[in-house]
């Protein structure tokens, strides 16, 4: 059973979402104001947060940033805002997923389960640092160490590695990666992601693509158990 904090001021939506995911492996706590989220979060320490953006008391973007400053808890933004700028901003504030209302309940459930797989064995998150065997990724000071040696990385290389690592065990399409990297969609021709993946593999002796796998026809997968 996973504890979910649902931050939603619309009673109807809160009831529908809470009842549906509550019938599965999630126990739901509803918070209706943005200015009390941080206090409630510290008290209950939920496993995942579903966060609306348009909230009384404090805007959801600010709430997202506050949560990310104190925790690596998975955050799924669930909002009626369809603007691409808002989506990019939400992801940059630290959200792990951005979903537009209305969404079929089954798809929302699938998204939650995907985010919870970040807590699978092989992944450790300590004070903003991701640990995978001999790989250490520090979000706070944007550094990477591999087998006890620092790895020199450009800003874009670090961002790509972090995007892959935070979705460890899940396949990310080129479109997923480009949207998180630049806020644009994959046009079928841009090879910059493929080239960047190749550079990352060279830095981590991954010529066989065992650590960052290519999933034919789908995209790339960061394997959390392969970083020994």
Image: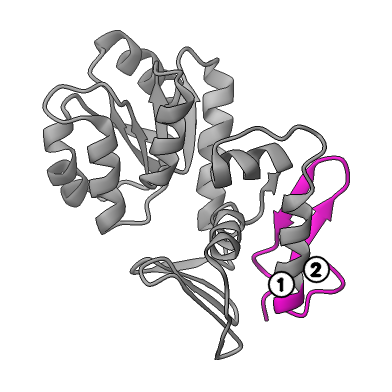
Label 1–label 2 contact, CB within 8 A: yes
Residue 85 position in % (x across, y down):
43, 29
For label 2, the SS is: loop
Residue 142 relative to residue 140: left or right: right
Q: Quadrant of residue 125?
A: bottom left
The residue tagged 2 is 210
Q: Quadrant of residue 140?
A: bottom left
Residue 59 position in % (x across, y down):
21, 29
Give the residue furthest to the top.
Answer: 12
Residue 52 relative to residue 132: left or right: left
Nearest to N terminus: mark 1 or mark 2: 2
The foreground one among 40 and 205 is 205
Q: Which residues are magenta?
A: 202-228
Quadrant of the drawing holding the N terminus: top left
Is residue 173 something one can see in this rendering? no
The residue tagged 1 is 226
Q: Is residue 79 above or below residue 210?
A: above
């Amino acid at each position: 059973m996973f504890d979910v904090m649902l931050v939603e001021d619309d009673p109807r939506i809160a009831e529908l979402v809470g009842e549906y995911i509550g019938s599965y492996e999630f126990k739901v706590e509803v918070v209706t104001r943005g200015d009390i989220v941080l206090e409630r979060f510290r008290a209950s320490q939920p496993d995942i947060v579903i966060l609306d953006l348009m909230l009384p008391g404090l805007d959801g973007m600010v709430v997202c940033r506050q949560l990310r400053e104190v925790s690596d808890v998975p955050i799924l933004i669930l909002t009626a805002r369809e603007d691409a700028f808002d989506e990019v901003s939400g992801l940059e504030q630290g959200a792990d997923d951005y979903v537009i209302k209305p969404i079929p309940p089954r798809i929302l459930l699938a998204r939650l389960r995907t985010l919870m797989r970040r807590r699978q064995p092989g992944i450790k998150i300590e004070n903003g640092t991701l640990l995978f065997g001999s790989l250490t990724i520090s979000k706070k000071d944007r550094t990477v160490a591999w087998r006890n040696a620092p790895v020199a990385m450009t800003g874009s290389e670090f961002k790509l590695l972090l995007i892959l690592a935070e979705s460890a065990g899940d396949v990310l399409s080129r479109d997923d990666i480009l949207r998180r990297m630049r806020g644009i969609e994959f046009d079928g021709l841009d090879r910059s992601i493929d080239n960047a993946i190749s550079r990352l593999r060279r830095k981590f002796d991954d010529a066989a693509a065992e650590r960052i796998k290519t999933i034919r026809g789908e995209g790339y997968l960061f394997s959390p158990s392969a970083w020994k």
